[in-house]
């Protein structure tokens, strides 16, 4: 159950989704902690099925999310996110939106770096938001939102950022369209995610590595190999390094910078909105 509050509703954000105090979020025991896999062959083929699966998946992994990101990344996740934060340009008193914010680490980093900026953390999963550390809960407004249907005024955000967001979007193309819509002209989007090799041999090797590595930690932490092998499955349906540039361009962006980590398994994308 989510208890909404008006105390941190910020009208100049022009959010149609009410902001919430994440300290008020409560989840009902037994409803979201089942480890029975809900993945099927067509889960990634339909946006609504993918959205429902992700909502269930992150309700399960939420208590262990910060731990598992360190384990899966060989403890490099924090370093990659520091690079992401360094790539965000100064916005003064502007607006920064962190999508798929999860426990709010990127959003909190933005607020520390740009204390005058209006930073909002948005995520689909109340269970993930409930795991935000006390320092984030006290300094950030959170908004429960679907990346494909952002309740935000057009041309109102200076920077959109996110980690492991685009690959998990119900439809990455629609997600980029929404990001383009909410960004101001020349606004920037900076995203960290897994990257898919264009070379088919390397792509297959990456898939099997991520599948087995994820399955191992799924068994260790949840008794279910499919929990984190989903990363490999979702990446398998994601555009490769050549086609991701075309996807950004198709939805109104020009990629300005790309940085690859861990031998090309993960990447940071900095793109700029083209036109109005």
Image (cartoon, grey):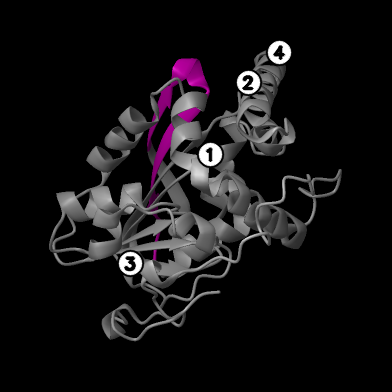
Asked if the residue under mark 2 is in contact with the one under mark 3, i.e. CB atoms within 8 Å, the reply is no
Quadrant housing residue 237:
top right
Q: Nearer the viewer, residue 227 or 253?
A: 227
Q: Position of residue 167 (x, y in %)?
A: 59, 44
Crowdedness near tag 2: few (<14), some (14–19) or many (≥20) residues, C-alpha within 10 Å: some
Reply above or below: 139 against 254.
Answer: below
* Magenta residue span: 257-276
Measured in 3D between alpha carbons, the distance from the residue under mark 2 to the one under mark 4, in whole angstroms, is 18 Å
Q: Nearer the viewer, residue 128 or 146?
A: 128
Measured in 3D between alpha carbons, the distance from the residue under mark 3 to the one under mark 4, in whole angstroms, is 40 Å
Q: Position of residue 267 (x, y in %)?
A: 45, 31
Decide if residue 114 is on the left or right side of residue 105: left
Crowdedness near tag 4: few (<14), some (14–19) or many (≥20) residues, C-alpha within 10 Å: few
Dot 3: what SS? strand
Q: Position of residue 1 (x, y in %)?
A: 56, 74
Quadrant including the C terminus: bottom left
Measured in 3D between alpha carbons, the distance from the residue under mark 3 to the one under mark 1, in whole angstroms, is 22 Å
Measured in 3D between alpha carbons, the distance from the residue under mark 4 to the one under mark 1, in whole angstroms, is 20 Å
Front of the two marks 3 and 2? 2
- Determine which residue is flagged by label 4: 201
Work out whether residue 171 can be spotted: no
- Determine which residue is flagged by label 1: 245
Q: Is residue 275 magenta?
A: yes
- Determine which residue is flagged by label 3: 157
| Residue depicted at x 23% and y 39% | 86
Front of the two marks 4 and 1? 4
- Determine which residue is flagged by label 2: 213
How many marks the image carries: the answer is 4
Decide if residue 58 is on the left or right side of residue 2: right
Q: Position of residue 75 (x, y in %)?
A: 40, 23
């Amino acid at each position: 159950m989510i208890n909404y509050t008006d105390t941190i509703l910020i009208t100049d954000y022009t959010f149609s989704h009410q902001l919430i105090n994440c300290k008020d979020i409560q989840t009902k025991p037994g409803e979201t902690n089942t480890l029975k896999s809900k993945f099927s062959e067509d889960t990634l083929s339909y946006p609504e099925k993918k959205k429902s699966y992700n909502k269930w998946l992150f309700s399960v992994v939420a208590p262990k999310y910060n731990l598992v990101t360190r384990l899966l990344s060989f403890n490099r996740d924090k370093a990659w996110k520091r690079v992401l934060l360094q790539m965000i340009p100064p916005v003064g008193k502007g607006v920064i939106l962190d999508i798929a914010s999860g426990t709010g680490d990127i959003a909190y980093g933005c607020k520390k770096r740009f204390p005058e900026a209006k930073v909002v953390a948005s995520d689909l999963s109340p269970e993930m938001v409930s795991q935000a550390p006390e320092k984030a809960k006290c300094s950030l407004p959170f908004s429960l939102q679907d990346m494909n249907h952002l309740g935000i005024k057009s041309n109102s955000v200076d920077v959109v950022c996110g980690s492991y967001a685009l690959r998990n979007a119900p439809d990455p193309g629609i997600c980029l369209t929404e990001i383009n819509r909410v960004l101001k002209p020349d606004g920037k989007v900076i995203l960290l995610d897994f990257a898919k090799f264009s070379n088919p041999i390397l792509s297959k090797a990456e898939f099997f590595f991520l599948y087995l590595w994820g399955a191992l930690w799924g068994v260790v932490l949840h008794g279910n190999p499919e929990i984190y092998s989903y990363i490999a499955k979702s990446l398998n349906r994601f555009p490769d390094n050549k086609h991701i540039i075309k996807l950004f361009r198709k939805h109104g962006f020009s990629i300005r910078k790309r940085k690859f980590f861990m031998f090309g398994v993960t990447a940071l994308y900095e793109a700029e909105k083209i036109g109005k």
